[in-house]
Amino acid sequence: MRVGHDNEIRDSAPCIYCANQMKDFNIKRIVYSNTNGNYTAQKCKDYATNHVSHGEKMRIKQEMCPMVPLVC
């Protein structure tokens, strides 16, 4: 679950890399908050996304340009 500064429930669905890791670890079910403020529960094997998290984008950028300081 993810909560914003305004105490509203935010989307906490796993990104593509986290989803793949969960599948590799044979996690059966995932539960996450969605953009409607509700919870979604489903089998991990049925979860599909193409979302790349901001943190993952920054990690990839840092790998491509290791001499550039990481600024968020």
Image (tube, helix red, strand yellow):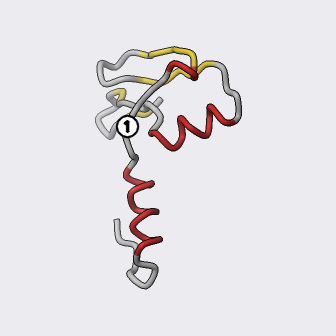
Q: Quadrant of residue 12?
A: top left
Front residue of 52/34: it is: 52
Front residue of 37/22: it is: 22
The reply, left or right, for residue 34 in relation to residue 20 is: left
Front residue of 34/7: it is: 34
Residue 38, horizontal then vertical, whole percent: 38, 15
Which residue ends up furthest to the right in the rendered image?
25
Front residue of 64/12: it is: 64
Residue 35, horizontal then vertical, whole percent: 31, 24
Which residue type does callout 1 highlight? Asn
The C terminus, quarter of image: bottom left
Q: Quadrant of residue 48?
A: top left
Residue 23 vs 41, above or below: the answer is below
Name the residue: 46% across, 63% down. Answer: 59
Give the structural element (helix, strand or loop) at label 1: loop
Q: Which residue is under mark 1?
A: 50
Q: Quadrant of residue 21?
A: top right
Packing grade of label 1 (10 A; few <14, some 14-19, many >=20) is few
Residue 67 vs 50, above or below: the answer is below
Residue 3, horizontal then vertical, whole percent: 39, 33
